[in-house]
Amino acid sequence: MASGSGSNNKNDFRRKWDKDEYEQMAQKRLDEERDKKDGKLVPPVKRELLRHRDYKVDLESKLGKTIVITKTTPQAEMGGYYCNVCDCVVKDSINFLDHINGKKHQRNLGMSMRVERSSLDQVKKRFEANKKKMEEKQKEYDFEERMKELREEEEKAKAYKKEKLKERKRRAEEDVDFEEDDEMAAVMGFSGFGSAKKAH
């Protein structure tokens, strides 16, 4: 094993390891594992290569909502973001994204962190597909449609202004009603309910 007295120099305090003994111990452990597995070595786990997510990450469904958490509340319904693959709760969206992109989560999904290496043909096909998408978007852009969208936006803005004017008129009418109530109270002999001073 380790010994400090193997060197001739008295100032050398480094440990010296017996490599032969550790090799024998490692061989013995491997033999025991083979015996347990009926003489066959267990092949290492082969995981899939990393691939794109086929779902959208839901970060906004619980945004602004209030929930009551008790001792009996299940972990999935507690505050924060719940990962059903790893059975854990993460408190904020940034850490949740870090978690689902991390090594532990990917391992639980059965994937390694290695990415499939793209060939030249795959890259060319992807460029062609992106180019076609851009051309389709340019074809879809139509002057008449754009004018229609602008008209709709103007109509929405006008409707919003009308609504604001109606709101102002309604508030003004309410203020007038309050003033009439004050006049009626003065005629009846009391000036107001809020003050203790009497008006002479």
Image (cartoon, helix red, strand yellow):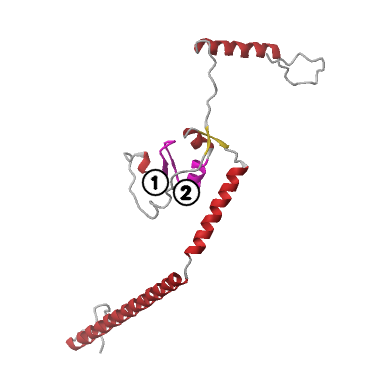
Where residue 79 is drawn, which disc sits there?
1
Q: Position of residue 88 (x, y in %)?
A: 43, 38
Q: In this rendering, is residue 148 above or below 66?
A: below
Foreground disc of the pair 1, 2: 2
The 10 Å Cα crowd at callout 1, few under 14, some 14 to 19, many 20 or more, is some
State the image quarter where residue 158 is shown.
bottom left
- Mark 1–mark 2 distance (CA, rounded to whole Å): 12 Å
Element assignment for label 1: loop
Amino acid at circle 1: Gly
Amino acid at circle 2: Ser
State the image quarter where residue 166 is shown.
bottom left
Screen quadrant of the N terminus: top right
Does the magenta portion include 85? Answer: yes
Element assignment for label 2: helix
Q: At 34% across and 80% down in the image, what residue appears?
A: 165
Where residue 50 is drawn, which disc sits there?
none
Q: Can residue 101 be seen? A: yes
Residue placed under numbered mark 2 in the picture: 93
Q: In this rendering, is residue 132 above or below 174?
A: above
Highlighted range, magenta: 81-101
